[in-house]
Amino acid sequence: MKPGKLYIKIFVSFVIVLIITEILIFGLFVFTAGRSARSRIERYVNAQSTVVSQYVEGTIRSEPDTGLSENRSLRRLINDLGKIYQAKVWLTGPDGNSIIQSFDGGIPEDTPAFRQKNRRKPLAMGPHHSIKRGFVQYVYVPLKFQNGETGSIHLLFENARRDHPEGLFALGLLAIGLVIALLVVPVSRRITNPLNRLRDSALKIAEGDLTHRATVKSRDEIGELGRAFNHMAAQLERMIRGGRELTANISHELRSPLTRIRIAEELIREKCDRGDLEGLESHLDDIREDIEELDKLVGQVLVLSKMDLREAGLNLEPFDTAGLLSELLERHRLAIGHKALKVQTHFVCDSPVSGDREALRTALSNILDNAVKFAPERGLVGIEASSEEDGVRISVTNTFEALSTEDLARLFDPFYRVKPTQAGGSGLGLAITKKIIERHGGKIEATNTPEGLKMLIRIPSRPPE
């Protein structure tokens, strides 16, 4: 399977960070542990150089009358030193030529002794050693012979040419880096696989499968993204289905007044054909009422759509909640008197509320319309308003039978009606009311109480930004 771009980005980014980290670790090793190890090696070499020089000088002094090249004890000592140190060991005279050596052949060409000899320059006096990449490769120690002449004992550690601590450490870091880089593969896939599933789910939803949901079980940020995606998909499904239902309900609501208008138009045409003008005015009045009903319905649909799209801005201003409720009650006075309803009010609003007065007027007017419209004759309508710590609490109760759980849950859906009624209405009032209250950062809910159906509204002192 071809790796995705995100997977490649994660892998490359991790490898870059890993390389930088290993470079820093290697540099830290070289400048700390490497220097410390090199210092300890130098001290050890200096001590061993002193011991070797004393052994060689002592062996030479033990046979003062024997020439250096004929001194068997000296030759045996140099051979033993070569075996002990696993190095090439040789003894040179004042001219730099090898007198005794623990190996066959000539002096290696890459040693300082060989270069000094070819340039015909004397070797420096005093212990000397060359350290390369952490290991001693070559050591020579000046010697004094009994006749006053000088020479040198040389040790060449050929194994040190291949073994370097920095190189071994670097190889170890490289191996660790490769292992970690390989481990990044499943880690990257663990990150990208849920994102791929989210992508596939988005494509399925885009193809029309609104019920599909992404399966993301992790509890990390990707899991939160998956749950947010599923919430978005659920909201999208609800909006699309709501839009379809809204279209169907609008079509149904428009059909009744249009049918009545068509019938009235046919009756008027028949009367005009017969020359009978009696009763035309009543048919025209019916047509006017139906047109007004259509205009009101279209206006409510437009308001609801603007609320869904948040196109309707809020004109915020402080207003008195109790004063607004009293004003709305006065407007419903005729309907209340017509049904002989008993009205109980209790207003205790100490602080004003900041909001869109006209929008809240519409919302509260819809609530009072429903309370008066659906209350039986001589029923009860109770209105309470009180200030809370963070806003105002309004409740409107009317005498009504207890509703089912489904009815309470769907009461604020557009065009939803609890049961057929002669009271009329478009079924959009409570839906618009809920949108207005929520735009102000408030909540509205319907509950059954012993007194009847209660609408409970909470509005904050100021809408959220």
Image (cartoon, rainbow, N blue to C red):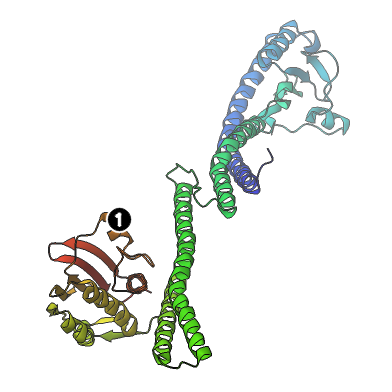
Image height of 344 relative to 47, above or below = below
Residue that carries the numbered disc 1 in the rendered image: 406
| Amino acid, disc 1 | Glu
Q: Is residue 182 left or right of residue 143?
A: left
Q: Nearer the viewer, residue 301 or 348?
A: 301
What is the quadrant of residue 107 in the picture? top right
Check disc 1: other Cα within 10 Å, few if <14, some if 14-19, many if 20+: few
Q: In this view, does 380 lie above or below 160?
A: below
Residue 4 vertical placement versus 328 (above, below): above
Query: Which quadrant of the figure contains the N terminus?
Result: top right
Outermost residue toward the top in this view: 72
Is 159 situated left or right of 207 in this image?
right
Could you say which quadrant of the image residue 94 lies in?
top right
Question: Looking at the picture, how far across and down is residue 25, in whole percent?
Answer: 58, 41
Residue furthest front in the image: 274
- Whether residue 154 is visible: no
Q: Residue at x 71, y 21 (%)?
A: 159
Is residue 376 toward the left or the right of residue 178 in the image? Answer: left
Mark 1, secondary structure of its residue: helix
Residue 86, percent from left and from top = 69, 16
The answer to whether residue 430 shows anywhere in this view is yes
Q: Is residue 40 above or below residue 453?
A: above
* Frontmost residue, 143 versus 452: 452
Q: Position of residue 364 (x, y in %)?
A: 27, 78
Q: Quadrant of the rendered structure where residue 97 is? A: top right
* Quadrant location, the C terminus: bottom left
Using the image as rendered, state which of residue 346 and residue 201 is in the foreground: 346
| Residue 218 coordinates in the image, percent (x, y) | 45, 42
Nearer to me, 164 or 64: 164
